[in-house]
Amino acid sequence: MVARVKARSYGPRRWIKPQERPINYAAPLPADRLPRERFGTWEFPVMHARGGTSTGLVIWDRVAPQELHLREELLRHLMGLPLEGTTNDAKQITGLGRGYPTSNKVFFAEMKRTASGAPQIVSTLAQLASGKAAIDWSVNCGNMSASLPYWAIDQQFLPRDLNGAGEVEIYNTNTKSTMIARVALDGDGFAFASIPGVDGAFPGVDLFLTNPVGAKTGKALPTGAPADQIGKYLVSCVDVAVPMVIARASDFGKTGTEPVKELRGDEKFFSALKALWIEAGLKMGLKRKDGTPMSADELANSETIPKVCIISPPVNGGHISTRYFTPQEGHATMAVTGGCCLAAACLMPGTVAHAIARGLPSLGAETSEIQVDIENPAGILSATIGGRRVDQTTTIERAAYKRSAQVLLRGYAPLYRASPELKKALAAIAANPALALSA
């Protein structure tokens, strides 16, 4: 005889709005944030996220071992890297990495308070590489940083509106730099944004670079002029977020809408571009790390500064169009720091960018923010510039680039091959949830 189970009737389930009660992050660690042991295997809590065009993990710093060698072992397990040395197998199928640099990033993040008592996210980036056990701790990632405010909100360290104005300060220990992240609300959720290189709209964030002027030269206009004649080219040398040489595409006989690979492969064009950035770099007074001036040969072979772009009027609904070089290679989109620099130049009367840009308002005597939409091969990069113009002088106070972010997954990752020392460290953390935090 088969037992019959009476069907139960369920009405529509009522959605309950989440409580926005931030965790007291100076209190003992919540049990659901701690490492745990299940079926003889230690598991570690992670959030898998996308920030801009990068993906990786965000880890609450407090639940990770403090010893560097154990942190690095933990990362290798989580991301699917060899535990030592290198390997030809770069697929990372045993972890959460995806085989290329932009998806091999891990942030250790912590909540602290500034001297004024405001919440602050303190971040430390680990940059990993497929097939390699070695980990780079020297750099930050402007894209992946976009995930950090959403990590803080998702983990209930901060309410959805952050400080009430949607802003939170982020300090990066790798580069000793600070930025401000700002998110916008839309009803019970977040305002969405679309960015080049990401299909579709997702929760947006503006990342403001603090003190962006004079990143390498100490001046917004390193040559002292908004435009300089270098040979047959009229250019602007601007240093906001990054030093960049801005030239008119038409001066090279180009439209400024050509594919980047085509431009990079044009030997005549690229030779002229290189000669231009060398002369401009000398005129800007760009320096080596030891503070001495770079030589023409060093500028010719530099992989980082100055950046250089050619510009033209917009054709797809933006304010200006560009093709960007790093400088040795053409960029498939537009770097965010370069975008901030070009956006600032568009708002500075006298620059070649200001003359070519279309449809932008002007900065006034009172500080205001203006969004500049920059057309590039991948779409439109939006940068927001905060500044003012008084007595014919333009002051750039902060620059932001727009990114979007996603929480891809949150949960526990089993560490099947954890060493006895790592297991011991995780057991100690799990057994001591009252670990101190210097807030």
Image (cartoon, helix red, strand yellow):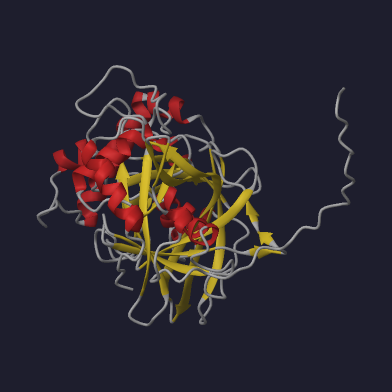
Q: Which residue is drawn at 27% across and 26% down?
A: 82
Quadrant of the image containing the C terminus = bottom left
Q: Nearer the viewer, residue 340 or 295?
A: 340
Q: Where residue 44 sits in the image (x, y, percent)?
A: 40, 44
Quadrant of the image containing the N terminus = top right
288 up-or-down from 114: above or below:
above
- Left/right placement of residue 324 relative to residue 74 reads right
Q: Which residue is drawn at 57% across and 46% down?
A: 195
Q: Where residue 168 sits in the image (x, y, percent)?
A: 46, 68
Q: Where residue 84 sits in the image (x, y, percent)?
A: 20, 28
Q: Which of 170 and 419 is in front in this view?
A: 419
Q: Which residue is drawn at 26% across and 38% down?
A: 73
Q: Which of 206 and 410 is in front in this view?
A: 410
- Left/right placement of residue 190 relative to residue 12 reads left
Q: Is residue 273 something that shows in the picture?
A: yes
- Left/right placement of residue 297 relative to residue 214 reads left
Q: Where residue 338 sits in the image (x, y, percent)?
A: 40, 50
Q: Is residue 381 something that shows in the picture?
A: no
